[in-house]
Image: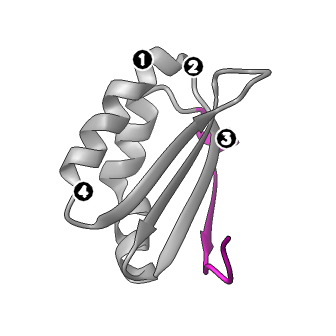
Amino acid sequence: MTTVICICRVADYDAFRPGYDRALELFSASIRSWRLCRGQDDPNVVLIEETFDSRETAEAIWNSPATAAAMEADGIDMASLRVEYMDEMDNG
């Protein structure tokens, strides 16, 4: 499995959230689990954590032009976008 961690700044969390919910519906067959957090000091800083069966599936979704266009439309500051692909090593 691959976990994607994305940290970014949004223009307005309340405007961003409906678009993220639409993406979850659209990719519900591919996303095994997800978590959304927002900054305590700046509520427009968002952390997205999504788990996929494979890196290939995750990259196909996260790197698609349609995803980039949707993120921009939802108010994500693309210059702030950081996406990492992670392997789980342990949990407790």
Residue at far front of view: 92
Q: What residue type is labelled 4?
A: Phe
Q: Distance between the residues labelled 1 and 2?
A: 8 Å
Using the rendered view, name the quadrant where residue 16 is placed: top left
The numbered mark at residue 27 is: 4
SS under mark 4: loop
Q: Are marks 2 and 4 in contact (CB under 8 Å)?
A: no
Left or right of 82, for residue 68: left
Q: How far apart are marks 1 and 4 (CA)?
A: 20 Å
Q: How far apart are marks 2 and 4 (CA)?
A: 24 Å
Q: Mark 1 points at which residue?
A: 15
Q: Name the residue under label 2.
A: 11
The picture places residue 61, in percent across and down from the top left corner, at 35, 63
Q: Give the range drawn in magenta.
A: 77-92
Vertical relation: 15 (above or below) 67: above
As rendered, which of 59 and 90 lies closer to the eye? Answer: 90
Q: Distance between the residues labelled 2 and 3?
A: 12 Å
Left or right of 17, for residue 29: left
The numbered mark at residue 79 is: 3
Using the rendered view, name the quadrant where residue 92 is placed: bottom right
